[in-house]
Amino acid sequence: MNKPDGLTIVREEDIEEFMSRLPVGKLPGIGKQTLKELDMLGIKMASDILKFDLSFWVNRFGKHGQKLYEKAQGKDNSPVEPYREPKSIGAENTFPQDINEKEEIKKWILVQSEKVGRELRAKGYMGRKVTLKIKFSDFKLTTRTRSLSYHTNCTKVIYDTAMELLGEIKLKKSIRLTGVSVSGLSRGYRQMRLIEDKATMKQEKIDRAFDYIVNKFGKEALRRGILIK
């Protein structure tokens, strides 16, 4: 039974038929090399594995062969990993060449702030802590974090906070990497802050319009002026 979220439920009595229609490469744990070997044996569908007995697969692949045989029968004793909410969402870049110009650093931080904000909004999260990470040419790593009084996924708030954090760091050496992340995540809407929020609400409308255009036409369809050379 197929569900709207892409989940397929196979009843026990339908496993054999399902495996006969499932390409063997769709089985979990089968890499390119294993797939090549299976192809040489004429194994195309998952059910084809059962044309050989268990000892054949164990002799050929060891423990992996046993798991392969079990999966072809619809059996998998691997523990189910529950979904875990992320603790933070971030973006970072290591540069091909170290950067010295502060304006160039600011551009990269803006790119990362936009990426983080867009991902937060896409996944329905807001966060209260913004962290800026800087790695210098000597590989020394420096981080600064600021806690906000409210949850946000607004790109401008993230960027402005990251800029404040950048101002706290002495940039005496060239920079190899920058990164921006937001933590203290929660889902839902933050509490409005009256007067201060009027400006933020305007920025959030801009973010929604920005997201719509980027999602429909691609990242290059719309860029902020500071990023255009």
Image (tube, rainbow, N blue to C red):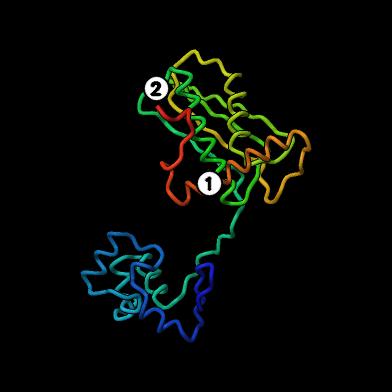
Q: Amino acid at mark 2?
A: Asp
Residue under circle 2? 98
Side of 82 relative to 218 (left or right): right
Side of 164 relative to 17 (left or right): right
Image coords of residue 212 (percent x, y): 52, 49
Side of 116 relative to 216 (left or right): right
Image coords of residue 72 (percent x, y): 39, 75
Asked which secondary structure carries label 2, the reply is: strand
128 shown above or below 46: above
Residue under circle 1? 211
75 shown above or below 138: below
User: Which quadrant, please, contains the C terminus?
Assistant: top left
Side of 219 relative to 54 (left or right): right
Asked which secondary structure carries label 1, the reply is: helix
Q: Are marks 1 and 2 in contact (CB under 8 Å)?
A: no
Q: Residue furthest bottom?
A: 13
Q: Residue furthest top?
A: 172
* Dot placed on the residue nearer the N-terminal end, 1 or 2: 2
